[in-house]
Image (cartoon, helix red, strand yellow):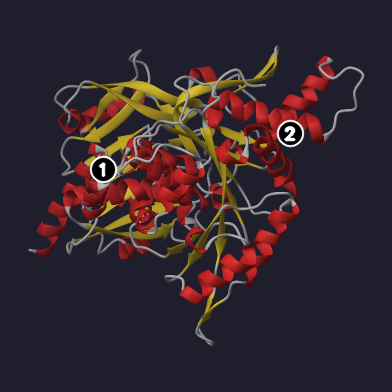
């Protein structure tokens, strides 16, 4: 099953009690501990759902879909394949913490595993044998893990986050697979880290460790003993709570790690380092101890602190009930705020309920900028268009991302060009002014999963535009995820009223960005710049947007 990677160490991260307690941030922080010591890392995220990838999932149910730069062809059998570039949102966290672009094959789902096994059975891969969860499904899981390990350059440490919580029926085959993996590579080459919630009951003034104890017992019942327990809580764990967890969960006290609420998530690796977790992992995995270099990361963390000037950024959209729907945008704004030495306060506007112009004007009286969010479909669209129109008329700094850029252009067509009923054919197939329409290559496509224009693409920026001045370059690479695009014959007619094309694709046929000439800052882009933003390396488009918002705020207050 394995031909190389003989010296790679493994860290398996599991979760207990409930989901959404920060396994992704914990995994990224553990990876950072190894990077502090000069070790190379790679990360796998296992998602037990039956989707091939999260591309067709509702953001309100699952959070945003992260898009990789590379596109991968998942081929379970020779004449059957899926194109994947849409992966779990935790990979955005991994990239932002580690600075390493991930590959789509690092996101393993139950859908991928079962498809490989079932189609393999149809092709005769298991002739004469009964196909079962063990060994066939678990073998496929291990094979996928080793595929990631053996990809050059081979990492010193592979971290594997298993989604969901221990006890979920969907996760059982994956937990069994890593149990087998531990037997095969040896317990000195693998560390199990269990992330649990330790609730604090205010009425009695006490941390309650029982949920953690039950979670660890469930894990032990599956043949897995955690080596380290990371305890999420609203405050620093008390000594008595740590001692109790250590005693009843069969781990040394120094391996019970406190993970309290913090205002800056990038501080978590430094918190782990203070508790000695990095040294614990190095010792457990029999790696050569190196002195951690944390100074550069500490400076990045420091850049997020001590800013008093607040900018209010309106984010009209349709998925605002779950902030994780826009996780990368939120983080890109945070990176830009650190660079501009400001604090960003996001003002969410649910545009399905708040769609009429009068209501939106009232909502937007105190905002310093408008970021029109990405999305799909017709729900909440009129509110988003009206918000964009207000940004044009009141000269509020505006940044439209993907669908937001498209709808911003629709707003210009209606409010400035006076093209009544102008729209995207995604919402109104019969509009007289189809400002936004399907890409030509999308017209014959019926399948929804993995069929959009996806992944990293070259963007040619028009010289002399505001966008060119922001990037300082005529050619950049950004990540895309769309079926529809702006139609040149309509955009060309808008030029006479001030809306110009500021970027194309490599062929010169697809419009990748537009902007208003006679506006303080109004840019719509077809791509997702937030996916390329990093702490300490904020994306220049988000930085420019916040600088424009600062200037607008200064003028508004004077």
Residue 289: x, y in percent?
38, 41
Q: CA distance from mark 2 to mark 1?
A: 44 Å
Which quadrant of the view contains residue 444? top right
Of residues 108 and 252, the one nearer the viewer is 252
Q: Is residue 548 above or below residue 445?
A: below
For disc 1, the marked residue is: 542
Of residues 421 and 197, the one nearer the viewer is 197
Of residues 265 and 454, the one nearer the viewer is 265
Of residues 43 and 48, the one nearer the viewer is 43
Left or right position of 247 against 41: right
Residue 31: x, y in percent?
43, 42
Mark 2 surroundings: few (<14), some (14-19) or many (≥20) residues within 10 A: many
Residue 103: x, y in percent?
48, 27
Q: Which mark is residue 138?
A: 2
Q: The C terminus lies in which quarter of the figure? A: bottom left
Image point (54%, 31%), residue name: 106
Image point (27%, 41%), residue name: 416
């Amino acid at each position: 099953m394995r031909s190389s990677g003989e010296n790679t160490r493994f860290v398996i991260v599991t979760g207990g009690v409930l989901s959404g307690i920060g396994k992704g941030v914990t995994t990224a922080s553990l990876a950072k501990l190894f990077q502090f010591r000069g070790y190379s890392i790679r990360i796998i995220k296992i998602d037990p759902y039956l989707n091939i990838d999260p591309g067709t999932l509702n953001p309100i149910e699952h959070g945003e879909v992260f898009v990789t730069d590379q596109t991968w062809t998942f081929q379970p059998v020779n004449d059957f394949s899926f194109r994947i570039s849409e992966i779990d949102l935790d990979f955005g966290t991994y990239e932002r913490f580690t600075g390493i672009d991930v590959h789509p094959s690092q996101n393993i789902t139950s859908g991928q595993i079962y498809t490989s096994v079932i189609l393999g059975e149809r092709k005769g891969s298991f002739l004469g044998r009964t196909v079962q969860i063990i060994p066939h499904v678990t073998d496929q899981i291990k094979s996928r893990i080793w595929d990631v390990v053996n990809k050059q350059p081979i990492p010193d440490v592979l971290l594997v986050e298993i989604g969901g919580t221990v006890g979920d029926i969907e996760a059982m085959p994956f937990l069994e697979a890593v149990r087998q993996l531990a037997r095969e590579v040896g317990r000195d080459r693998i560390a199990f880290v269990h992330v649990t919630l330790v609730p604090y009951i205010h009425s009695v003034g006490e941390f309650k460790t029982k949920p953690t104890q039950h979670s660890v017992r469930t894990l032990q019942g599956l043949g897995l003993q955690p080596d380290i327990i990371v305890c999420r809580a609203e405050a620093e764990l008390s000594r008595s709570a740590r001692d109790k967890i250590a005693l009843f969960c069969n781990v040394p006290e120094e391996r019970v790690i406190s993970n309290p609420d913090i205002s800056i998530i990038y501080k978590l690796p430094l918190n782990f380092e203070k508790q000695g977790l990095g040294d614990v992992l190095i010792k457990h995995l029999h790696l050569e101890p190196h002195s951690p270099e944390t100074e550069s990361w500490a400076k990045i963390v420091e850049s997020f602190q001590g800013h008093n000037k607040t900018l209010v950024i309106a984010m009209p959209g349709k998925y605002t009930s779950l902030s994780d729907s826009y996780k990368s945008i939120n983080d890109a704004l945070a990176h830009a705020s650190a660079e501009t030495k400001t604090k960003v306060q996001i003002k969410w506007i649910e545009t399905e309920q708040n769609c009429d112009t009068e209501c939106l004007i009232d909502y937007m009286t105190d905002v310093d900028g408008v970021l029109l969010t990405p999305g799909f479909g017709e729900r909440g669209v009129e509110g988003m268009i009206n918000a964009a129109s207000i940004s044009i008329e009141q000269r509020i700094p505006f940044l439209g991302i993907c669908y937001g850029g498209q709808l911003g252009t629709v707003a210009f067509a209606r409010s400035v060009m006076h093209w009544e009923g102008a729209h995207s054919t995604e919402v109104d197939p019969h509009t007289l002014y189809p400002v936004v329409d399907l890409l030509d290559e999308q017209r014959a496509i019926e399948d929804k999963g993995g069929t959009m224009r996806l992944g990293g693409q070259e963007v040619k920026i028009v010289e002399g535009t505001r966008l060119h001045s922001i990037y300082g370059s005529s050619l950049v690479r950004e990540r895309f995820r769309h079926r529809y695009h702006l139609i040149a014959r309509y955009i060309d007619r808008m030029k006479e009223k001030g809306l110009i094309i500021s970027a194309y694709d490599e062929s010169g046929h697809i419009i990748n960005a537009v902007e208003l000439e006679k506006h303080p800052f109004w840019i719509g882009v077809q791509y997702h710049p937030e996916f390329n933003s990093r702490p300490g390396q904020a994306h220049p488009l988000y930085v420019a947007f916040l600088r424009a918002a600062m200037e607008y705020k200064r003028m508004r207050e004077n």
